[in-house]
Image (cartoon, grey):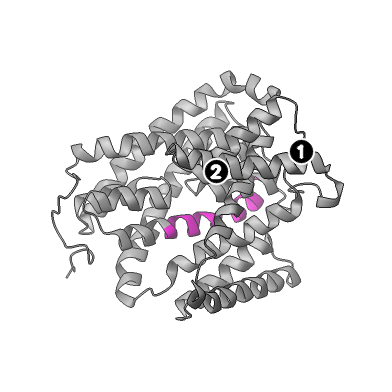
């Protein structure tokens, strides 16, 4: 809409300023964290920012293509070796539900909001499912945005400080070095994969559709490279914007109830993630960096970026995140009925927030 163009222009300018400042200060991942920091601070200061719409969606398809291009016959051949750690993902998600649901219920949230706030799935999916079950969409959006924000902020610190990872790895070759034929195939896979997955109702269509189609091209020997570095850096920029604008219009009450609740839950998630990382590392199921990234409960797109820049085994990391997402998407609505989060049911406080305490 024309009226949204000035807001989007301001948002993009702030994002670029944040990127430039992070770059000049030598801080890690300037396109992602510089953008995120600038948009988050502006949103909390009351600036009326606006997301980039379809452009942000296209940015996510780039990451799907990057993952798909990394799926080679060698990676496929190693899938049986990953079954042990993949099986642990199911246990991991189950424990998160057992811990997270009573946590949010004790804070006064209704069953639907509490259940879908606890589930480590995609933000849009969990908000949609929770709203259909009678939950508070605004609370769910802010709690999940906070989860992704904190995990994304802490993960690079943990990777560098604890695991000695170098986050300056090349995310891809420059555009000028890639053959035009492969670039055309990558671009086609991004759009066709996205729209095709969307048409059949596949969850996470913007990432999984392009990933599946690009993986087929990679396994068929038609492509041998990731998307150009410029495209992946642009994807980081728009992902940072997407997280930051979630906090536009946050009120003091929402900051106190929803966001603080999300922060407390992240502490629980971090402890569980640390335990499972140690399990897969000590048992030899994964190397430390891959184990950490595979069980970090962040967003799929954000973890893809970190896997790329850290030089981790992208196939290993993403297989675990896809398993988590599939399990949550398929299992959460079924399990929701067991905890009383049924469609249309509202038990406890109204969608305006949890019960006040004290």
Look at the picture and state if 23 lies above or below 29.
below
Place of residue 49 in the rendered image (x, y in percent of width and height, measured from the top left): 50, 74
Question: Could you tell whether 327 is left or right of 242 in the image?
Answer: left
Residue 39 horizontal side relative to residue 342, left or right:
right
Q: List the residue tagged with mark 2.
A: 194
CA gap, disc 1 and disc 2: 19 Å
* Dot 1 crowding, Cα within 10 Å, few <14, some 14–19, many 20+: some
Residue 147 painted magenta: yes
Q: Nearer the viewer, residue 80 or 289?
A: 80
**Vertical side of 237 occupied by 304: above or below:** above
Q: Residue at x 55, y 33 (%)?
A: 319
Q: In the image, is 103 to the left or to the right of 144? A: left
- Magenta-highlighted stretch: main secondary structure? helix
Q: Secondary structure at mark 2?
A: helix
Mark 1 touches mark 2? (CB < 8 Å): no
Q: Is residue 291 visible?
A: no
Which residue lies under the disc numbered 1? 225
In the image, residue 208 lies at what x, y percent? 53, 39
- Asked if residue 54 shows in the view, the reply is yes
Chain part drawn in magenta:
145-163
299 in magenta: no
Q: Earlier in the sequence, mark 1 or mark 2?
A: 2
Residue 133 in percent (x, y) is at 23, 48
In-front residue for pair 67/357: 67
Give how far across and how far down residue 189 sits, in percent. 64, 39
Residue 16 position by quadrant: bottom right
Report the quarter where the C terminus lies. Answer: bottom left
* Marker count (numbered): 2
What residue is drawn where x is 52% and y is 22%? 83
Q: Residue at x 55, y 43 (%)?
A: 194
Which callout, 1 or 2, points to the residue nearer the camera?
Answer: 2
Q: Quadrant of residue 327?
A: top left
């Amino acid at each position: 809409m024309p009226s949204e163009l000035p807001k989007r222009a301001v948002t993009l300018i702030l994002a670029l300023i944040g990127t430039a400042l992070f770059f000049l200060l030598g801080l890690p991942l300037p396109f992602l964290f510089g953008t995120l920091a600038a948009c988050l601070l502006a949103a909390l200061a009351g600036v009326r920012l606006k997301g980039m719409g379809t452009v942000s969606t296209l940015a996510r398809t780039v990451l799907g293509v990057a993952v798909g291009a990394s799926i080679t016959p060698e990676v496929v051949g190693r899938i049986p070796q990953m079954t042990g750690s993949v099986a642990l993902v199911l246990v991991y998600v189950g424990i998160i539900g057992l811990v997270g649901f009573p946590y949010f219920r004790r804070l006064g949230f209704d069953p639907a909001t509490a259940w879908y706030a606890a589930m480590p799935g995609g933000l849009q999916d969990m908000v949609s499912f929770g709203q259909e079950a009678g939950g508070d969409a605004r609370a769910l959006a802010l709690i999940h945005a906070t989860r992704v924000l904190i995990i994304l902020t802490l993960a690079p610190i943990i990777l560098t400080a604890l695991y000695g990872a170098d986050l300056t790895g090349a995310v891809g070759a420059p555009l000028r070095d890639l053959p035009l034929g492969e670039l055309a195939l990558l671009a086609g896979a991004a759009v066709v994969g996205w729209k095709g997955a969307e048409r059949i109702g596949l969850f996470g269509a913007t990432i999984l559709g392009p990933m599946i189609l690009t993986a087929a091209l990679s396994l068929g020997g038609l492509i041998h490279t990731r998307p150009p570095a410029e495209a992946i850096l642009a994807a980081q920029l728009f992902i940072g914007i997407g997280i930051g604008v979630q906090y536009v219009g946050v009120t003091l009450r929402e900051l106190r109830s929803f966001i603080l609740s999300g922060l407390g839950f992240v502490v629980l998630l971090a402890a569980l993630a640390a335990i499972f990382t140690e399990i897969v590392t000590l048992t030899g199921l994964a190397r430390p960096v891959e184990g950490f990234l595979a069980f970090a409960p962040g967003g799929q797109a954000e973890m893809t970026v970190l896997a790329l820049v850290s030089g981790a085994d992208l196939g290993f990391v993403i297989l675990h995140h896809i398993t988590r997402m599939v399990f949550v998407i398929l299992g959460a609505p079924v399990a929701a009925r067991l905890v009383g989060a049924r469609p249309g049911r509202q038990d406890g406080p109204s969608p305006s927030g949890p019960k006040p305490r004290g």
